Image (spheres, helix red, strand yellow):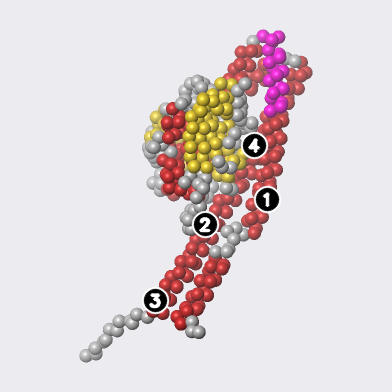
Amino acid sequence: MVKVALRRPRPNFGHVSLFLVALLVGFLVVTQLRGQLAAESASGRSQLSDARLLADLIEANNRLRTEITKAEQELAALKGNSRVDVDTLVTELNRLKAINGLLEVSGPGVEVEILGNPEPFEMLDLVNELRNAGAEAIAIGNPQTMVRLVYRSGIGGGRGWILVDGILLSGPYYIRAIGSPDTILKTLERRGGLLALLRYTHPDWVVTVTPADRITLPVYPNQLSFKYARLMQ
Amino acid sequence: MSLGFFGRPPVLLALSLIGLALATGYRLPTQSLETARDAGDVSAVAAQLEAEQRRLQNRLGELQAERDRLRSRAQGPQEGLSGLLAELISQQVLAGTVGLTGPGVVVVLDDSPRRPLRGEDPTLYLVLDSHLRDVVNLLWQGGAEAVAINGERLVVSSSIYAAGGTIVVNAARLAPPYEIVAIGPPELETLLKAPDRLTQLKARVQNYGLQFTVRRVPEVTVPPYKGGFATEHLRW
């Protein structure tokens, strides 16, 4: 019978220390790699948001130029015959009412369908992203009710129940937005974008964006009055 | 003099590796030169566009003031005009193109004065775009009638997003501290301070030293929106 002597390795101060040193090296290398990855990801994000910022600035300037042209034309007409062209005024009035959510509006856009139970902040982020993508009018709702959003719309509630300006909405949720379907679709569906994040966080949800040639949004249902604000003198 | 343990070849090798890691790893720039140059370009282009934006905003402001002056002068001789002009002003107020004043709250958010610990996510110490969105959303829920962040009036098309270390509102880059002024009911103060509201932001205040103050004021001024509205796709 061969007796195998199980020899317990002798503790060796050098080996133990070397192990600790190797551990430290490993830690340093991993920390460095993590740092680099984070920096790359942050710079990727920042390049994306830089592009977004520049696009935003260019669009804002284009909108200003359009408003300037309109104001110049009206001013020239006013100076020409010193009479206000009522048609111009009515057109401007209706445009503002459409912007303010006080007229029914239609146009091309997208419909976002959410089969899930979003929290208010997730709906808020989606609305913010749509505005960012140049949506000109937005409404939130479900198959029964659509609530047009105005400048002072607030989104409250909790997971699975959404309150838009005091109107209770249950799922499935729809967000409809008028604007360039292509731009909105690309913004929402971009890699690492909001929809990707929602789908990653909630794998059981189904979130779809469908472009449409014509979307109709209703008039804002509540009264918009001022109780505290006055015109600045 | 003997180096003892530190003189052993494997230990020397390991120590060299640590030295290498410390020398290279911790001194590697977080951005490559190319990225930095691109970032510089973006900043320069953005600054040019912003200067152009200010020029256009001033031009539009002058034209609108002159137009409104001529319109009101025509009001007397032209029958039925005053009603139309009054309606127009009320729509301009809703659109946010008119400055407003009234009682309300002033909310100030600022980055933490503390420095992040090594390995900690530095964004934990910063005011994020989502914090501003949450505060503004709560103000609207509480009945605010007009809101501005660092002088940028919030209108129906306004979005709040982060870009290159700043927060962008109405295509304007804002820097901390972020001052949110809102006209509305006095209860806004209680609502913002309620422990069950803005919980994520308040946790950052508690744990990371983010600055968040709410003050009720008898009078605040909310400036007008100076940009334009896109309506190319809208039919009414």
**Amino acid at pointer 1:** Asp
Amino acid type shown at disc 4: Ala
Precedes in sequence: disc 4 or disc 3:
3
**Residue B184 horizontal/vertical position (percent):** 49, 26
**Percent position (x, y) of residue B169?**
58, 38
Q: Quadrant of the C terminus of chain A?
A: top right
Which range of residues does the magenta coloring cover?
B61-79
- Residue of label 3: A16
| Mark closer to the chain start, 2 or 4 | 2
In this rendered view, identify the residue nearer to me: A131 or A231. Answer: A231
Circles 4 and 1: CB atoms closer than 8 Å: no
| Residue in the image at 39% along x and 29% along y | A168
Extreme-front residue of the structure: B1
Q: Height in image: A89 above or below B32?
A: above
Q: Are the residues flagged by discs 3 and 1 in contact, CB closer than 8 Å?
A: no
Is residue A153 in sight in this rendering? Answer: no
Mark 3 vs mark 1, foreground winner is: 3
Q: Is residue B182 above or below residue A233?
A: below
Q: How far apart are labels 3 and 2 at the CA level?
A: 33 Å
Query: From the viewer's perspective, is the residue at label 2 or at label 4 nearer?
Result: 2
Mark in front: 4 vs 1: 1
Q: Compute the Cα span from label 2 to label 4.
A: 32 Å
Image location of residue B103, percent across then percent down: 51, 25
Q: Which residue is mark 4?
A: A60
Q: Residues within 10 Å of mark 1 (few under 14, many from 20)?
A: few
